[in-house]
Amino acid sequence: MMKKLTLSILVLSALFGANAQANNTITFLGEVSDQTCEVAVNGNATNPVVLLPVVSTADLASVGAVAGETPFTISVSGCTVSATDALPIKTVFVANNVTASGNLVNTGTATNVALQILDSVGGAGVNLTTVNTVEGLNVAIGESSASHDFAVQYISEAGTATAGTVVGVVQYAISYL
């Protein structure tokens, strides 16, 4: 009886262990730096919200159509920069709910609509399927602050967007490496 129980436990452990390794992965990302700047989005250091304009379903009727590009500014202040070297800073965007094309899944009620983060106003889309660092923030020699304009826009990856709300969430961090 004890051998059967032990064997059953080992088999179940192997099955659940394989499943846990394949589907339940947590990746922790961090950085240790001698630099710590204060960060704000559109001047708001906590809980920033970027409001996009209302657009027509006709604007998002075709596959890959985009509309409503809206700039948002990430700024840093209180940085310590040497007298001889500028401080290039990268912005890291990470999302948990991403389309196969690397855009933010809409958790609102509109269908066939996602949100695309752009590396600058009028710039290229940031692929959120992997951890991406985006350049743009650069604190000049002798300065203590900098800002960079990113953008977000609606995108209809499949076309035929329907009316409703659009909601997406992305996390960001600042990297001094």
Image (cartoon, rainbow, N blue to C red):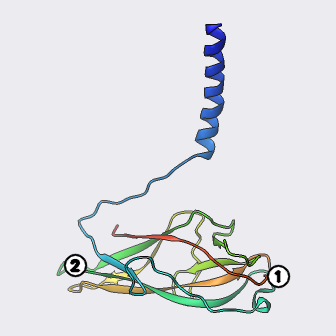
In the rendered image, the vertical position of residue 4 relative to residue 107, given as above or below:
above
Amino acid at dot 1: Thr
Disc 2 to disc 1: CB gap under 8 Å = no
Residue under numbered circle 2: 81
Quadrant position of residue 74: bottom left
**Residue density around tag 2, few if under 14, some if 14–19, many if 20 or more, within 10 Å:** some
Residue under numbered circle 1: 160
Quick one: SS at disc 2?
Answer: loop
* Residue positioned 36% across, 75% down in the render: 89
**Residue density around tag 1, few if under 14, some if 14–19, many if 20 or more, within 10 Å:** some
**Nearer the N terminus, badge 2 or badge 1?**
2
Mark number displayed over residue 83: none
Percent position of residue 81, x then y: 22, 78
Q: Is residue 70 left or right of residue 113?
A: left
Q: Is residue 75 left or right of residue 27?
A: left
* Residue positioned 64% across, 91% down in the render: 68
The label nearer to you, 2 versus 1, is 1
* Residue positioned 62% across, 43% down in the render: 22
Amino acid at dot 2: Val
In the rendered image, the vertical position of residue 169 relative to residue 150, given as above or below:
above
